Image (tube, rainbow, N blue to C red):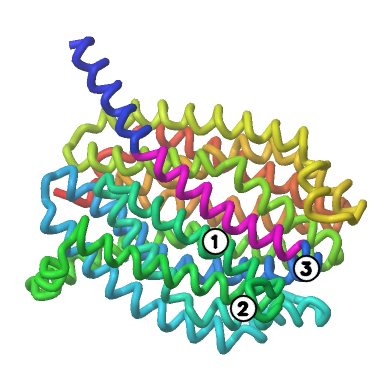
Amino acid sequence: MAIAETSVSVNLRGQVRKLTIPIFIEMLLVTMMGATDTFMLSQYADDAVAAVGVANQLITFAFLVFQIINIGTTVLCSQYLGAGKRDKMVQVTAMALLLNLASGFLLSALLSLGASTLLSIMGLKDDLMVYGLPYMRLVGAFAFFQALHMTISASLRADNKAIYPMMVVLLVNIVNIIGNYALIFGNFGMPAMGVEGAAWATNISRGVAMVTLFIVLFTRHVPFGKLVEAYHSPIAELKHEMHNLLRIGLPSAGENMSYNAQQVVITYFINMLGNEALTTRMYVVNAVIFVYVFCICVSQGASIVIGHLVGDNRYYASYKLGWYSLKLGIVATMVMSVVFACIGGEILSLLTENPEIIALGSTIFIIDIAVEVGKVCNIFYTTVLRSVGDVNFPFYVGVTVQWIAGVFCGWLFGLAFGWGLIGMWVAFILDEGIRGAIFIWRWHSKRWQQRSFVK
């Protein structure tokens, strides 16, 4: 029995690694895409980096609407595939595409037409608005590209086909880099468009990704005929899948929305500290993504395998695999965090010549080591708890702790006590640490068992 259990454990670990590697490469490429934009714009103007950073924060927040459906897609498809119900997986994918197409068009209109109002609410100063406004209008107008991209990728990963989204993002990175080089600075005979050039490069690359993923969807995952058939399924079945998508997605995306809303408010506070503090935050935030990117990928890979196990009623294996995967994420994140703390000054020196930004950012990189300890647990367990059907608990914990420890303490330490950006990061330590401890307890308690959506 012990030998069999060990064999199963090794096999499951192999599945997690097999999924994590392409997801990691994909996520690394996505992160590099954002870092490339930041680096190229930093050669154009520091203010452009700050303005585009604020605009992207709003756009990213809006994209969480798509996650309402995409999180549900990943969970349901994983559990249905684990239970051997592939036809149900096709129904879920069909409904997800339809719902996100509709929400994509609505958000595109909102972001583009309401760009000026949204950026004004964020308190973006006039000298930054000249960069932020055209970027947000252009990128926001094509938000529906990202809606469909994210939906197809979610379904592919749930079917252990993470290699395809990874390859598409590699293509997109190449298109985006060439587009930025050509359109920001006016190379290859193109006009020098500055921030607007960066926006067009983003839109073109996202359009290429969407078209390519549709080709992959129909040729490698769900044939076009099967997808059309799914739309002719009994209305009751389609309503049931839509209900489950929303039942999973609303609280799951709600936690993400709460976190991103928290970050938007924190950005508003930091904006009150001045342009140097705001620019420093944008540089550091774009850099530390590389610190926890592996943890995000491990959590996504583990959540898919655990979703399959739960669909097959293998709860003990799910529990053990959760602990193993968390350890992987913690080790990788801590190593990267220490490395970035050691070379933070050098990283910032590549992006700016402003000594205030370099000095402040270097200190933030060191403080951020403590932030990442809790963040690993939060990223991992919010993802994995959703995969087993425990979708409400992360939402309640997230909303409560993020706004008390994160927002209130961020204002208290950063503005009221006058600690500035360092005070904001101290608040992040409290926020991430408290939530991380609660989620560890939840997984250990096993109260998440028997919450599967597939009966």
State left or right for residue 236 relative to residue 283. left
From mark 3 to mark 1, how far is it between C-alphas?
33 Å
| Mark 1 vs 2, N-terminal side | 2
Which one is in front in this view, the residue at disc 1 or the one at disc 2? 2
Residue drawn at (60%, 75%), measured in percent from left and top?
199
Q: Residue furthest right?
A: 355
Indicate the quadrant containing the N terminus: top left, top right, bottom left or bottom right: top left
| Mark 3 vs 1, N-terminal side | 3
Q: Quadrant of residue 319?
A: top left
Which residue is labeled 2 in the image? 136
In the rendered image, is residue 444 in sight? no
| Mark 3 vs 2, N-terminal side | 3
Question: Alpha-carbon neighbours of circle 2 within 10 Å: few (<14), some, or many (≥20)?
Answer: many
Q: Residue furthest bottom?
A: 113
Kind of residue indicated by mark 1: Ser
Residue 440 drawn at (x, y percent): 48, 34
Disc 1 on helix, strand or loop?
Answer: helix
Residue placed most toward the observer, 94 or 186: 186
Can you tell which mark lies on residue 435?
A: none
Q: Residue furthest top?
A: 2
Q: Which residues are magenta?
A: 19-42
Which residue is labeled 1 in the image? 258
